């Protein structure tokens, strides 16, 4: 058995490793220490580091979740079409990053897509009609988010608009965690938060091994990434979905149509910036393979692995290695 299995799979060692698990931001957070961490003192330091990472994730969730009534984002959404809202510096910066990603991707990533969320229920398999989607789609437009950096205010221009930062929230939390771990002089670790992985340093003198799963076959791998000091983010149509009349409806919504993006099964982004990886894995999925590759090729520190609807694998450069089952 693998040590653990998610949208991305870490093949860290043969033996089970000490790790901490909890639910936060709607997913399981896991932090793995390297096998060379064996002394009592080292393990105590890592225990404290795990608690700090957990604290960071909960704090980021508290600040950025649109689902928490007292969060700054919830208060901003409540004032849509009414007036500008002054935000805490961290929250304003996060909104600004989301709008930048919307601009960079031509709206393939759009935080105002949250206006559509009420139409899609993946628990009850509710399929909205085209008319229902069209009645709300005009609210999805990142250009209608007005930022004032001097006053640190954000205004949602139209009543009913909603911002949701779920598409970059875990990436932001990983970046904040990285800062804490630098301060604590923790140099070797792997953190998994849903489809996001942050790796630093080495494990037994070697790079960390992160396996990319095949869509719909969680115990089979496309291949393995040998990485360090980077972030990996995977978005797939198999994470949350339902099928109706032979069509798969998944949670990666194209903000330009209001319906799930088609043509791709999964996108894995590899880049040192965790926030960028988080946002791009969604945006590239929406953009489609050709436009996704075109954008990635213009970004020197970004690589991508794409699986299209036929199961064919495309890489911006050769990165995946074959699976070595002897380490399982």
Image (spheres, rainbow, N blue to C red):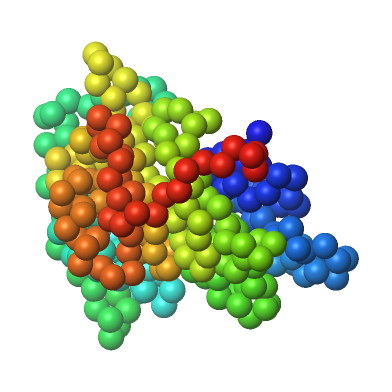
Name the residue at 13% across, 29% down: 130
Q: Nearer the viewer, residue 203 or 114?
A: 203
Q: Is residue 315 visible?
A: yes
Q: Is residue 162 visible?
A: no
Measuring from the top left, give residue 146's x and y in whole percent. 20, 69
Q: Quadrant of residue 269?
A: bottom left
Tally of numbered discs: 0
Q: Is residue 231 above or below residue 254?
A: below
Extreme right residue here?
40
Name the residue at 66% across, 61% down: 203
Measuring from the top left, give residue 59's x and y in whole percent. 56, 63
Q: Nearer the viewer, residue 250 or 288?
A: 288
Measuring from the top left, give residue 39's x and y in whole percent. 86, 66
Is 14 positioned to the left or the right of 262 in the image? Answer: right
Name the residue at 71% across, 44% down: 14
Measuring from the top left, give residue 92's x and y in whole percent. 36, 72
Extreme top residue here?
245
- Looking at the rendered image, the quarter that the C terminus falls into is top right
Q: Is residue 145 above or below residue 248?
A: below
Q: Nearer the viewer, residue 245 or 312?
A: 312
Name the residue at 49% across, 32% down: 220
- Looking at the rendered image, the quarter that the N terminus falls into is top right
Extreme bottom residue here?
150
């Amino acid at each position: 058995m693998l040590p653990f299995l998610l949208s991305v799979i870490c093949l860290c060692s043969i033996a089970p490793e000490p790790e901490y698990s909890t639910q936060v931001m709607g997913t399981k957070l896991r932090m793995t220490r390297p096998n060379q961490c064996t002394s009592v003192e080292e393990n105590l330091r890592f225990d404290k580091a795990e608690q700090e990472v957990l604290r960071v994730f909960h704090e980021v969730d508290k600040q950025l979740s649109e689902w928490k009534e007292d969060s700054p984002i919830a208060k901003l959404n409540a004032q849509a079409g009414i007036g500008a809202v002054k935000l805490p510096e961290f929250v304003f910066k996060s909104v600004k990053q989301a709008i930048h990603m919307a601009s960079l991707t031509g709206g393939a990533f759009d935080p105002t897509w949250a206006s559509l969320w009420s139409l899609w229920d993946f628990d009850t398999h509710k399929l909205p009609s085209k008319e229902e989607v069209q009645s709300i789609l005009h609210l999805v437009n990142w250009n209608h988010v007005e930022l004032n950096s001097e006053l640190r205010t954000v205004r949602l221009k139209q009543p009913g608009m909603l911002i949701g930062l779920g598409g970059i929230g875990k990436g932001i939390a990983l970046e904040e965690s990285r800062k804490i771990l630098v301060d604590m002089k923790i140099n070797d670790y792997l953190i998994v938060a849903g489809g996001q992985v942050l790796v630093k340093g080495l494990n037994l003198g070697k790079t960390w091994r992160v396996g990319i799963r095949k869509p719909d076959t969680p115990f089979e791998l496309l291949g393995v990434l040998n990485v360090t000091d980077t972030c990996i983010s995977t978005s797939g149509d198999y994470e949350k979905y339902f099928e109706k009349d032979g069509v798969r409806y998944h949670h990666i919504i194209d903000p330009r149509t209001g319906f799930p993006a088609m043509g791709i099964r999964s996108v894995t982004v590899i880049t040192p910036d965790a926030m960028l990886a988080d946002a791009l894995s969604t945006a590239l999925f929406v953009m489609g393979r050709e436009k996704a590759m075109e954008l990635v090729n213009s970004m020197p520190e970004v690589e991508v692995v794409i699986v299209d609807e036929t199961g064919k694998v495309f890489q911006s450069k050769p990165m995946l290695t074959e699976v070595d089952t002897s380490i399982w």
